[in-house]
Amino acid sequence: MYRREMSTAAFLALVLLAAAALGAAGGARALRELYRGAGGKVMAVALRILRDRGDAEDVVQEVFLEMWRRAERYDARRASLETWAVVIARSRAIDRLRARGSATRAAEAHAREPAPEPPTLEAGEALQERERVHRALATLPTEQREAIELACWEGLTHSEISARTGQPLGTVKTRLRLAMAKLQDRLSERRSAG
Amino acid sequence: MTCEDFREVAGAYALGALDPDERAPCDAHLAEPTHQGCPEALDQARAVLAAILSSLPPVRPDEAVWRAVEVRAGIDAGPRRPVSIGWIGWAAAAAASVLLVLWQGARLDAQRLREAEGRLEAERARSPERELAALLGEPASRVVLLSAVPGRSGRAAAVVNLAMRRAVIVTANLEDRPGKDWQLWVLRGTNPPVPAGFLRFVGAGVAVGEVDPSLLGAAPDALAVSLEPAGGSPAPTEVHLVGKLSG
């Protein structure tokens, strides 16, 4: 439903990565293309979760090495290459976050915001897409948006969100379910309209 | 757990927000053979997550990060060790052939063993995927995009090395249609398009095809992909993709 046409860079990376999976010397070119196309997004996700540039860059390394070594796991029918990359990035970053311990995580979440982002070379379409998602998030009630953000960026479960926010478990589940349903509807509507 | 139950928590499942005692029944439910909208609900929830993740403005990592990836990936250490992948049928066949050859080797004389190995290498060399892989490693190779003509969708890339008379086309967004073939074409000037081979679906949504090398003696102006009845046509009937090599 939400699947987007891949960018040219990501598409090239895909076809080259497919070749890389075959054990080609040319796979090196694939990885470079992939890094050029998705490296900035992977870094952004890792930095948003970890809030530490050094740790985030370690995650970026892990993501591209994982894609390089496990290219055969990629299925073009399920997601774009960029999506695959950012999903891996989230997973690896949350692993690191969990390793820090919950107390540290909670303190960091409130203590520091991500550093201001430098200007990027985003294409107009990517910028519009980003704003579209931000607008959809902004329409959520504060408590629903908070639930989504804690789950998405900190990897918290229902019970962990309940403990963090002091809200009953059932309330947390409802908020998260409603938030996801609303985002799904709004992104779908806007995509159809756009 | 019913399908309705799962659909209720599909969003939390996609986010990884379910506690272990909630997740286990979901995993068990997804393993069941039939569903009423569960995979679709999960795909939609995953798409929401992907949209959120992708909505951050890109942040350029330090230059040292890419250098570290290169080193750790062993990119500068020469050709990469071949990877065994499930969606390439020839890989499994080739591995089985090697084992068979090795097993029989004790009873074969050296000459027969060399012949068997030669056949295996020839088999590998004929694989379009292998051709693509080899071409990518050639410094003179370039990548040409094939874009959809008006009214069509899809995209492909061609790895082209005219000095070697090689052009391999790969795509990840054309459908494998029953009773149809995706046919390749070489275009020169105002001459009629020349049939140049077919795409072959190798799995995971990826299709690969090699342009007939005999057609690459002189540089083509463009390459094209069309949808044809099974077995192909002498002239394209439904062109979908075109990519210019000249100009």
Image: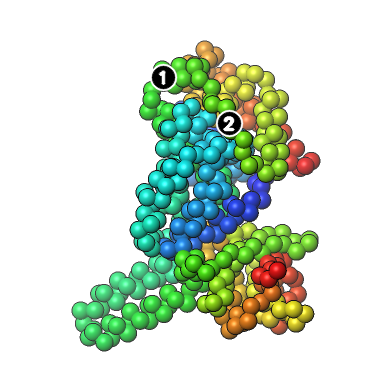
- Image spot of residue A115 (x, y percent): 54, 26
Q: Is residue B14 above or below residue B199?
A: above
Give A129 or A151, whichever is nearer the viewer: A129
Residue at the image point whose x is 72% and y is 62% from the top = B148
Q: Residue B137: tell me if it is visible.
A: yes
Res A15 quadrant in image: bottom right
Give B202 or B40, whichever is nearer the viewer: B202
Which SS class for mark 2?
loop
Give B214 or B16, whichever is nearer the viewer: B214
Residue at the image point whose x is 41% and y is 67% from the top = B91
Residue at the image point whose x is 57% and y is 70% from the top = B160
Res A139 quadrant in image: top right
Q: In this view, does A46 lie above or below B200?
A: above
Q: Name the residue under label 1.
A: A104
Question: CA gap, disc 1 to disc 2?
Answer: 24 Å
- Image spot of residue A11 (x, y percent): 60, 55
Q: Mark 2 points at which residue?
A: A117
